[in-house]
Image (cartoon, rainbow, N blue to C red):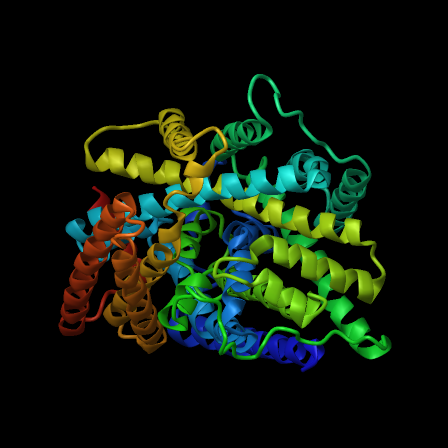
Amino acid sequence: MSSLVLMLVGLAILGLGYAFYSKYLSKRVYRLDKGFKTPAHELSDGVDYVPTNKFILWGHHFTSVAGAAPIVGPAVAIIWGWLPAFLWVTLGTVFFAGMHDLGALWASTRNKGRSIGSLAARYIGKRGAALFLVVIFVLLLMVIAAFAVVITGLLVGTPSAVIPTWGAIVVALLVGVSVYKLKWPLLPVTIVGVVALYSLIVLGDQVPVVLPDDFLGIGPASFWIIALFVYGGIASMLPVWVLLQPRDYINGVQLFVGLALLYSSVLIGALFLSNKPELVAPMWNTAVPEGTPSMVPLLFVTIACGAISGFHGMVSSGTSSKQLDKETDARFVGYFGAVGEGLLSLGTILAVAGGIGSVARWEEIYSEFGAGGVNAFVEGGGLLMENGIGLPASLSATVLATMAVLFAATTMDTGMRLLRFVVQEIGQAANVKLNKYVATLVVVAVGLGLTFSQGLDGEGGMRIWPLFGTTNQLLASLTLSIIAIMLIRKRRNPLPALLPLIVVFIMSFWAAIEQLFSFTNPANPDWLLFVIDVVIIFASIWVAVEAFIAMRKAVKAPPEPEDADEKLEAVREES
């Protein structure tokens, strides 16, 4: 089958989803109100609550939720065939991720920018909220530790990505000053910023940075991990307009440039080359390698970002809702942010299913479950761009590796900011007030402790990563339960939230149980992951029961007051 056909069908599904379903959700379900005073205006503080241009905010939101996961997930899950991955990415984005991300953004905006954990306390109850925070804390810890290891691996393995990775920080700082302090128009600043970023990519390709084995008394991997945590800690405390917003925005634009190059390569190759890009991966793989788990339910947790992800709800309610200028911007920021991630996942499928040169090479890469990942994406995408638009293989690899690094880095520093909020919320629950400096030190210390827990190579950062998929999707289902409760209380149609909630909870809970048994395998038991998995399963069951009880109460209770009264109710709750 031609890669072009798959690309066009995928783009059509995602485009129609944004054009029609997101409009239905915005007008009929969430009823977004242009005149509603958002938390960014009501609680403006110049640090976390900052009214933001919707394009800049989309860049922050999109790159924060994207990271490396929409690359890694599909690049691993394609071992079951390209069709299951394609269907889950496209339909999941339209009916699951878009609804979830937009809903979490709306829910938080209607509650003074509160996080999902805080919303759980209001809509589910304090007991459920406490356990909700446990799941969120574990998930965010997984993200910052694992992404530090992933970024480090790319910086060591692709030294040409070092200069553009760190140079992007300088570009972002200049973009932030230009837009917010000098008040320059966004379009020319964007053009100059993207040109500067791609110039750094070209420079990096010509001047790769390889650290010596003994650098400042430690190895390269240890140095990059420490540098990333120091950077992330500082970035998480800076006002969002200084670095977070402009960095994520310019990264978002460069991702779309990169995706345009990738998609153009498929189009040009199919129309003008004699050696047209064909899908070498099987449509439905009936000969998976020995040891590969069953597709159901593992497909639905292997591909999280790019279909639906609980981490998105934390970003929507943790940072994006605090920067929303007008409530109607939520459709573009939240739903189209999910569509952007779906486009990245679709591009990944095209790269690893059609970019790999031959069936033999594809089978060599996917000789065991868990193989492929970012390296398969870089290899396949690089070959597509080299054959399609004539971009040299080394430069293509640098473009794609830099893309993966920059998105992983934006997710990591956003994750650290979110985890700082969670630590402060946990402190409040324990009647201990933690300022942002102390909370950030706690985050950095715990993150570094986990990452180096199995040696200075950082392998500890991946120690609890096997639990990410199930934990992430369980969190998504719990977020959907909060959205459903809000809709029921407002007497609006809850089915757009309830149906994804049922599917995601069943699949993720099923996967968590399967993992639980795998951790007790006598040949290779892992009791740490077993205990953590038990805690996550217990917390998820408890919150799900509390959510079900809250839904039944919401059905029987009088309709919730309109927003003006709701805001007064929220103030009374806080006081």
Q: Position of residue 425 (x, y in %)?
A: 28, 39
407 or 26, which lies in front? 407
- Residue 243 vs residue 270, the one in the foreground: 270
Residue 409 visible within the image: yes
In the picture, the quarter occupied by the C terminus is: top left
Above or below residue 528? Residue 556 is: below
Which residue: 68% across, 42% down? 158
Give the image quarter of residue 418: top left
Q: How many marks?
A: 0
Viewer-nearest residue: 359 or 140 = 359
Q: Is residue 35 left or right of residue 178?
A: left
Q: Is residue 56 above or below residue 477?
A: above
Q: Residue 482 location in percent, x, y?
A: 28, 62
Residue 155 position in % (x across, y down): 63, 38
Residue sitting at x 77%, y 73% = 267
Q: Which image quarter is the N terminus in?
A: bottom right
